[in-house]
Amino acid sequence: QVQLVESGGGLVQPGGSLRLSCAASGSFFTIYNMGWHRQAPGKQRELVAQITRGGNTDYADSVKGRFTISRDNAKNTVNLQMNSLKPEDTAVYYCNANVLSKTLNKGDYWGQGTQVTVSL
């Protein structure tokens, strides 16, 4: 089993910054891609950013230039630095990891979500 625990959400004014963190724990062999998704009320969950084990990154167009994803393979963590936040960034943010288990089975795991609210 793999557990993903997020932290760092909260309330911030437009133009402000937040840093989200996610730590993976449990029994597994390795973690491939890690990423952040978000879901706003009444909308579908969407990919915000993802990063491969080797450090290659991909971002949604709406966050390019404002958000930066990073990871620490030794600590099994992934972070999302969010700058110049806008009200439309308001959503529940979910950490995601593609994991290879010790029985060599691949699976996707999700955190419980952390609320980010951008408002005056």
Image (cartoon, helix red, strand yellow):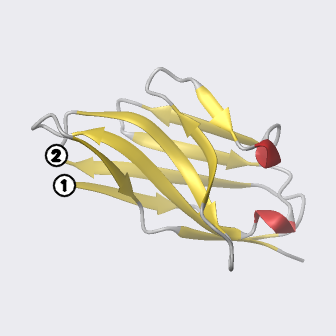
In the depicted view, which residue is nearer to us: 7 or 88? 88
Residue at 36% across / 42% down in the picture? 98
Q: Which residue is mark 1?
A: 1
Q: Amino acid at mark 2?
A: Ser
In the depicted view, which residue is nearer to us: 108 or 70? 108
Residue at 89% across / 65% down in the picture? 14
Q: Which residue is mark 2?
A: 27
The answer to whether residue 9 shows anywhere in this view is no
Residues at discs 2 and 1 in contact (Cβ within 8 Å): yes
User: Can you say whether 8 is above or below 84 in the image?
Assistant: below
Cα distance, mark 2 to mark 1? Answer: 6 Å
Is 103 situated left or right of 26 in this image? left
Q: Position of residue 41 (x, y in %)?
A: 68, 79
User: Can you say whether 87 is above or below 35 in the image?
Assistant: below
Q: Residue placed farthest to the left in the image? A: 103
Q: Position of residue 23 (x, y in %)?
A: 39, 50
Is 6 situated left or right of 81 in this image? left
User: Can you say whether 87 is above or below 106 in the image?
Assistant: below
